[in-house]
């Protein structure tokens, strides 16, 4: 019952989305529907006049030739409306789809990083992407079909009521089982989509592994194509089995619906024969009634199909509405602040959803203006999580983050901090666009120069305007180290007082790494930096080094102080340097 109450509200919401997406296009599509209904009524009226002229040659109302011309005109208009509607539905459906995509993109943009990385959010997002976003065109067509068929049903009903009122209930009786069957179909379709979302996600992932260029080398190096294809084939078999079962169910529903409409049509036509035989209507009225019954049957089929389409789409629209509603309200735009004194954390604690052990557990940290501060520790010690808290990407569960002594809002922190992660994005754009992706900043050529990227740029066919990557265009691919310099230039272009660098030299060769860290302060141009690195040769130049273990800071000091303390840092440093000796 609750679903039945919600369905009209969802359909009304879908109608508003269609109108807002393209008001003029909606009016034009509605006009075509109205024109089709009027043309269908004209066919019935012209048919009645034609039968009158044929059966009563001395009929004074109209001659045979004008009646036939009117019948031809009405038939031509009725036949031409269909293609016009199809093309108008095409462009209207695209604009509705764009509007719904905009709503989805707005929701994902507002989601904070913790929400975005959660499994439940990712599954809901994928389900909406796969199913709810494919519904706008279906909803558009169904709504317009509903409008046109209602006009047609009304017009044909008026004709039948004028000829013989008893014929109308026979045809309308088919609507009750058709609507009930449509409700059944909608429930089964949504349950099917909900059940197969996880299968589709796993299959899509395997398809990417088997087809995308970034994975090609390793898949071939490990000769993993066969095992991955076997997994893909197994998922295909599961999908096919579930799809076959659902298709058989839908075919049964369609057959029952068709049987109901056909039974109603047959009953109405037999009733017309009976009415003629009993003399209640003459042959001209019988001919007009037969045309009206046939057209009304078609309009009812369209009407029931439109209702079925809307009922089927309603659960997916509800899923979309729930997803959009689950997103937070749009927050204020962040404003960049200068760093006069320091950024500090006091007692910062953070746990990922579903995990009991904190990833960051009671950490105190400070980065003074112009300082280079390093975070070191073994994998899983919490370094990157702590860096995200500093950058305003995560909010601490406990403790406080202060900017120049003030608990600054997260949007302002994000606007004042630049972050380059180890797994930075390689945008399939030009070199220039890769650097200026964040918007306004310093001169992109200057950022490229500071990052040591200009020698690479000079060797590219179109310099800064060279397309990079081969996924979207036939661009130029770069080495890992060259891509890392592009990422560094992107960070330097965004003129913020604090930069977080997560393994900034991971893909650089020893010479390039030495050049970067020898001149790191000049490269930063006086900005403060939080540096995460596993290479202790890169961190020894830092003003202060924090050593993390199991989410806690276990040591803090300069390189010389930590070596003298002979603690965990000294142990890790000696282990690493021993490999070079």
Image (cartoon, rainbow, N blue to C red):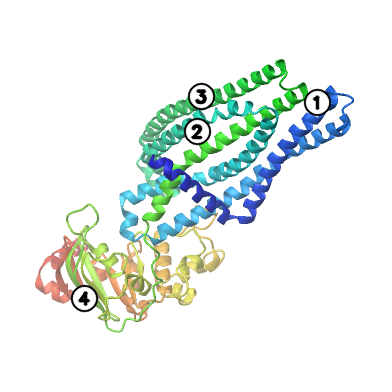
Q: Earlier in the sequence, mark 2 or mark 1?
A: 1
- Residue 371 lies, in percent from the top left, at 27, 79
SS for tag 3? helix
Numbered mark located on residue 544 in the image: 4
Which of labels 1 and 3 is toward the front? 1
Q: Residue at x 51, y 58 (%)?
A: 476
In-image side of 240 versus 118 (left or right): right
- In whole angstroms, how far apart are the C-alphas of marks 4 and 3? 76 Å
SS for tag 2? helix
Vertical order, 34 against 333 (above or below) = above
Which of labels 2 and 4 is toward the front? 2
Instruction: Kindly identify which residue carries mark 1.
Output: 51
- Residue 509 lies, in percent from the top left, at 35, 64
Q: Residues within 10 Å of mark 4 (few under 14, many from 20)?
A: many
Which of labels 4 and 1 is toward the front? 1
- In whole angstroms, how far apart are the C-alphas of marks 2 and 3? 11 Å
Q: Disc 1, disc 3: CB below 8 Å? A: no
């Amino acid at each position: 019952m609750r679903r039945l109450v919600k369905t009209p509200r969802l359909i009304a919401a879908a109608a508003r989305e269609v109108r807002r997406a393209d008001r003029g296009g909606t009016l034009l599509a509605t006009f075509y529907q109205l024109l089709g209904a009027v043309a269908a009524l004209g066919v019935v009226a012209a048919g009645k006049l034609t039968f009158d002229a044929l059966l009563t040659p001395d009929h004074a109302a109209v001659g045979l030739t004008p009646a036939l011309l009117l019948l031809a005109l009405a038939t031509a208009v009725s036949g031409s409306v269909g293609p016009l509607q199809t093309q108008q539905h095409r462009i209207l459906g695209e604009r509705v789809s764009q509007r719904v995509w905009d709503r989805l993109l707005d929701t994902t943009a507002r989601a904070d990083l913790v929400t975005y990385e959660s499994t439940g959010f990712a599954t809901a997002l994928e389900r909406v992407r796969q199913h709810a976003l494919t519904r706008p065109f279906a909803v558009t067509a169904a709504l317009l079909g509903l409008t046109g068929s209602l006009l047609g049903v009304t017009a044909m009903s008026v004709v039948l009521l004028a000829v013989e009122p008893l014929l109308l209930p026979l045809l309308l009786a088919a609507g009750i089982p058709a609507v009930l069957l449509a409700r059944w179909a909608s429930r089964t379709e949504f349950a099917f989509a909900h059940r197969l979302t996880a299968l589709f996600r796993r299959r899509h992932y395997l398809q990417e592994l088997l087809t995308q260029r970034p994975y090609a080398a390793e898949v071939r190096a490990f000769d993993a194509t066969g095992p991955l294809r076997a997994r893909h084939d197994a998922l295909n078999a599961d999908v096919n089995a579930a799809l076959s079962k659902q298709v058989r169910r839908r075919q049964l529903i369609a057959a029952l619906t068709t049987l109901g409409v056909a039974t109603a049509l047959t009953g109405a036509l037999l009733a017309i024969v009976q009415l003629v035989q009993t003399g209640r209507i003459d042959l001209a009225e019988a001919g007009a009634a037969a045309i009206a019954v046939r057209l009304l049957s078609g309009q009812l089929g369209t009407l029931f199909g439109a209702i079925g389409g809307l009922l089927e789409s309603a659960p997916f629209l509800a899923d979309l509405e729930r997803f959009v509603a689950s997103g937070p309200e749009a927050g204020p735009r962040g404003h960049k602040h200068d760093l006069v004194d320091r950024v500090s954390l006091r007692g910062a604690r953070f746990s990922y959803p579903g995990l009991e052990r904190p990833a960051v557990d009671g950490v105190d940290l400070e980065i003074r203006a112009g300082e280079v501060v390093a975070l070191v520790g073994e994998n899983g010690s919490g370094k990157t999580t702590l860096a995200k808290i500093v950058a305003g990407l995560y909010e601490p569960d406990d403790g406080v983050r202060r900017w120049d002594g003030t608990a600054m809002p997260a949007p302002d922190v994000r606007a004042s901090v630049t972050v380059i992660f180890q797994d930075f994005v390689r945008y399939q754009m030009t070199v220039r666009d890769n650097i200026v992706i964040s918007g306004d900043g310093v001169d992109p050529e200057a950022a490229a120069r500071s990052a040591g990227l200009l020698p690479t740029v000079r060797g590219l066919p179109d310099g800064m305007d060279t397309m990079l990557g081969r996924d979207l265009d036939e661009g130029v691919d770069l080495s890992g180290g060259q891509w890392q310099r592009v990422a560094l230039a992107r960070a330097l272009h965004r003129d913020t007082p604090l930069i977080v660098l997560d393994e900034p030299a991971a893909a650089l060769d020893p010479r390039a790494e030495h050049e970067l860290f020898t001149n790191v302060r000049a490269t930063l141009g006086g900005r403060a930096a939080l540096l995460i690195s596993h290479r202790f040769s890169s961190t020894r130049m830092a003003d202060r080094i924090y050593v993390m273990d199991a989410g806690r800071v276990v040591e803090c000091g300069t390189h010389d102080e930590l070596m003298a303390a002979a603690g965990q840092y000294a142990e890790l440093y000696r282990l690493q340097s021993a490999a070079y000796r």
